[in-house]
Amino acid sequence: MNGPFRNQYHRLIANLHRTDGFIINYFQQKLSPHDLSVQQYSVLRRLQDVYPDSLTVSEVKERLADHNSDITRLIDRLVAKNLVVREVDEQNRRRVNLRLTDDANRFVGEVAQEFKDFESIVNHLTDEEVETLNILLDKIRNA
C-alpha cells in the first residue's frame, strides 16, 4: 500500500479521527458566537431533554458521548453563566441535581436552531450508504 498508511485498517482509524474532527469543528463554529463549547452545549442539551426536571451529575456524564470530560469544571462554567443551577436532592442530601434555568431552556432552544440543517454535512450520501455506515459504526463501538 502506498502512502502514509500501513494498511486499510490504519487508514480507517485515521479517517474516523479526521471525520470526528470535521464534525466537532462544525459544531464549534456554530457554538462560538454563543460562547459555548461543544461539551457545554452537550450538557445543556441533555438537561433540556428532561427539562423542567433535573439530572444528577453522574446521569449527565453517562449521557455524554465524551465520558472522559471534566464534568465538574464543565458544570461550574455553566453555573457561572447562569445556565444551570445545582440543587441538593431532598431525598439524598449527598446527591446534587442539575437543572436548566428557564432562560437557559429558551436559550438552548434558540441555539439548537443553528443545527436544524446539521444533517447537511452528510446529505450527499445515499440512504443505503447512511444505513451501512451506521451499522458499521455501531459494530465498531459494540465489538
Image (cartoon, helix red, strand yellow):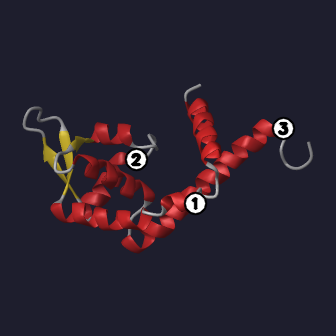
Residue 87 locus on image (x, y percent)? 14, 47
Task: Classify mark 3: helix, strand or loop.
Answer: loop
| Residue at 37% over, 71% down | 34
Mark positioned earlier in the residue sequence (2 or 1): 2
The residue lying furthest to the front in this view is: 127
In the rendered image, which residue does mark 1 sit on? 121
In the rendered image, which residue does mark 2 sit on? 70
Whole-angstrom CA distance, mark 2 to mark 3, is: 35 Å
Task: Classify mark 2: helix, strand or loop.
Answer: loop
Residue 135 locus on image (x, y percent)? 59, 34
In the rendered image, which residue does mark 3 sit on? 7
Q: Quadrant of the N terminus?
A: top right
Locate residue 115: give its quadrant.
bottom left
Which one is in front in this view, the residue at disc 3 or the one at disc 1? 1
Residue 26 locus on image (x, y percent)? 54, 63
Whole-angstrom CA distance, mark 2 to mark 1, is: 29 Å
Mark positioned earlier in the residue sequence (2 or 3): 3
User: Is disc 1 surrounded by few (<14), some (14 to 19) or many (20+) residues within 10 Å?
Assistant: few
